[in-house]
Image (cartoon, grey):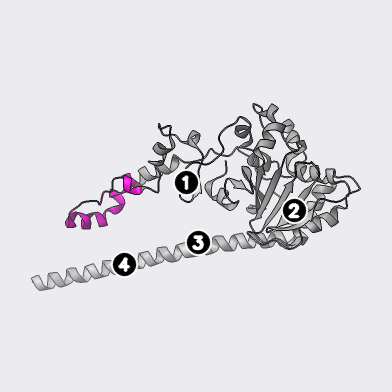
Amino acid sequence: MASGDERQLFGGETWKGDALCGVGERIKKIGFIHVSVYKIALYVDIEGMQQAMQQFRDEELDAKFYAALAQANFRKRIVLRFSRNLSTSQLRPAFIELLEKRVSEQVDVPVIVCKLIPQDQKAGDTIELCFDADGKTITALSNGEEVFSGCCPGPEDLHRALQNAYFDEQTAVPEIRPAICQRIPSILQGANTKPKIAVEGYASEPQSSIRSGGSTASSCTAYSPTSKAELPSPLHQKSTRQRVKNMFFKRKKNSKYEASSRDHEAVYALPASPKSPPPVPTAITNNDDRDAIIEVLKAQMSTQAKSLQENTARTNLVLLLSIVNFLILCMLLATSC
């Protein structure tokens, strides 16, 4: 299930009236480094899907299910949000290779891909592919601006091919299929997909995902981590002396409260995503891959250097305090003599 951050990333539980089915991530392994390429979300028209795929309401997410999903005629949206800067020379060949295997010779794949990806993509940019319920029309948007509409030879081929790039058995990213489809079974079974409880700025799952004994939304919100005033504070209504004492032992005194807060936050934890097969290691073949590794290593080294500086500063402070305490002790001994 998509986490709260991922739901925020793709505009919440709905996108232009369609419901979120799941969020996956394209991760490329270069040597021993895992590099996130983009995150991908699937949105569908709930009513259209319930009518077209009702026979799969009790079925597992298998090859038959994915094939039917790509063939079914109801509105679907695939939204990609890029995690790093990528040039057209990196993106277009990959998409051309995916489509040429799945379309007829009537479709001029390079021309279409150039329209789908008109420019270099920066971290945070989006590409949206909207598949209309007529089974033919495709609309592509780059950062919200329409760049392509499916009026071309063989539109049916292209309509299916773009979906099959993620759903068929020859897909290069099989780990994405279960991730972006994980809510579909519950939608087909008629589960309430509308969020009811707001937690820390994003919508959480309805009552069914909450482990508390209450059955109403009002009883659930009583345990919201944002309503911390309802939990007892160890520093509340204490004497001045006790407050000063607690300031020096705040970590110990508040450990029970922190554990309680973590438990209540866990109440809203969404079910874990199904395990996906690990990415297959690939050799470093070009300068772009090498640059990606260098970027990741630089970020890791920067984080480690910052942590080392903080630890050094703490050590120096403790040493300084020890010296001051030693000098004070010497002064006291000198005056007593």
Which label was assigned to residue 140?
2
Which one is nearer the viewer's eye here, 290 or 141? Answer: 141
Q: Amino acid at mark 3?
A: Gln
Which label was assigned to residue 304?
3
| Of pointers 2 and 1, the one earlier in the residue sequence | 2
Mark 1 — residue?
Answer: 198
Residue drawn at x 74%, y 53% as measured from the top left: 140
User: Residue 224 in the image: x percent, y percent?
Assistant: 40, 44
| Of pointers 3 and 2, the one earlier in the residue sequence | 2
With respect to residue 81, does 166 lie above or below? above
Q: CA distance from mark 2 to mark 1?
A: 32 Å
User: Residue 118 in the image: x percent, y percent?
Assistant: 77, 61
Q: CA distance from mark 4 to mark 1?
A: 47 Å
Mark 4 — residue?
Answer: 319
| Of pointers 4 and 3, the one earlier in the residue sequence | 3
Q: CA distance from mark 3 to mark 1?
A: 36 Å
